[in-house]
Amino acid sequence: MFLSLSLALILCLPAQADSVSSEQSPPTPSETKIQLRLATGSHGGTFLPVGHDIANWLNANQTTFEVVVDTTAGSVDNLSRLIQGEADLAIVGSSPFRKVLEDQGRLALARGAQGLLVMGSLYDDAEQFVVKTSMVRANSMLDLNGLLMYPGPRNSGGEVDTRTVMQTLGVEPRYVYPVERTKGYLEAAEALARGDYDACTFSGGVPIIAVEKLFADHPGEFCILPFTRHQLSKVKHASLDFEPVTIPANSYPGLKNDLRSVGGPNLLITRGDLDPELLRLIDATIRAGIQDEREGLREKESHPVLQILTESHWDIVPEGVPALELGPRGGTEQPASRGRQAP
């Protein structure tokens, strides 16, 4: 009888241990949710804080998925991650997206349903070409001729946009070697302040954190070069993805007047192979955040570019770029492009 009781106790132990383990370590919410990776940008830019704001809203307002934010080099890096399946969502500039579609179209097509699609437009950026004030002569983009310039991190949208603008205007700066373009915007601003180079591109929604800090820490030492009307016209007619934009006075410490520049829409892009119901939920949750001005995506603690986001702007898709079309019951129809409208 004693042996039988001992054996019975021993046989019961695994079941009891499993029961205790189950009670002490219940599945966490993140373990029961679908994990989505959102590719953003570098420290000091706009993509990263905007990405965190979007992820925080999405994670707090549904229970199906969890968004994890990844720090990246920027648009081109983000597109590569999407194509390789290393990201599910990404913030990307329209100009780099168009170029990657042209350059890597075969790869995107080979993936079939895993092609890249625009979910919506988040905000328009502004190309901000910052230079040492002591080197300004014409007070226009022509001042960049011959200067040593950091065009943005390698594989960033700023790098792509800088070359497009410079080639269009016939301006020829000396670029920092590609192997040395590893700095995010905060590090790039610090290097500019040290004198490692003469000028730097900061591409993003106003205000850009790195530019704010640079102007605050070094008052009067740096400025943003404005575009002349002729330069604006040349860039606009040379690219579908650039429009004249204004950087308002007081956007940065010491900026006393409005500045003319160029910019284009920054998009939230996804992979077309994701579950249509999941994509529909993401879209619906973002729209709910846009509609809630007090506590949603547009609340006062969000990045300023999100505070002015509207549903009509979210619906903008640049001409000729594949867009996600959600069917009435959550299914996806054939991707279609909608012409860019005024915000």
Image (tube, rainbow, N blue to C red):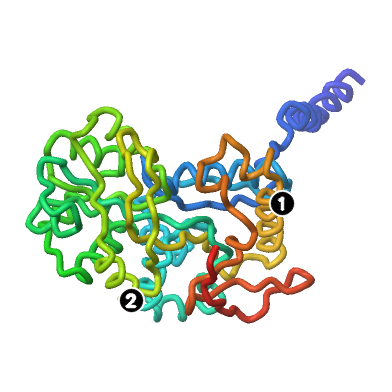
Of callouts 1 and 2, the N-terminal one: 2
- On residue 237, the disc is 2
In the picture, the quarter occupied by the N terminus is top right
- The image quarter containing residue 14 is top right
Q: Mark 1 near mark 2, Cβ–Cβ under 8 Å?
A: no
Q: Which residue is mark 1?
A: 288
In the rendered structure, which amino acid carries the disc numbered 2?
Answer: His
332 lies above or below 71: below
* Residue 8 image position (x, y, % from top left): 86, 27
Q: Residue at x 64, y 59 (%)?
A: 311
- The image quarter containing residue 59 is top right
Residue 125 at least partly seen = yes
In the displayed orientation, state which residue is furthest to the top: 2
- Element carrying mark 1: helix
User: How busy is the neighbourhood of tag 2: few (under 14 within 10 Å), some, or many (20 plus)?
Assistant: few
Q: Residue at x 26, y 28 (%)?
A: 217
43 lies above or below 103: above
321 lies above or below 144: below
Q: CA distance from mark 1 to mark 2?
A: 36 Å
- On residue 224, the disc is none
In the rendered structure, which amino acid carries the disc numbered 1?
Answer: Ala
Name the residue nearer the viewer: 3 or 172. 172
* Residue 259 image position (x, y, % from top left): 32, 51
Q: Residue at x 10, y 58 (%)?
A: 145
Side of 302 where 231 appears, left or right: left
In the displayed orientation, state which residue is furthest to the right: 1
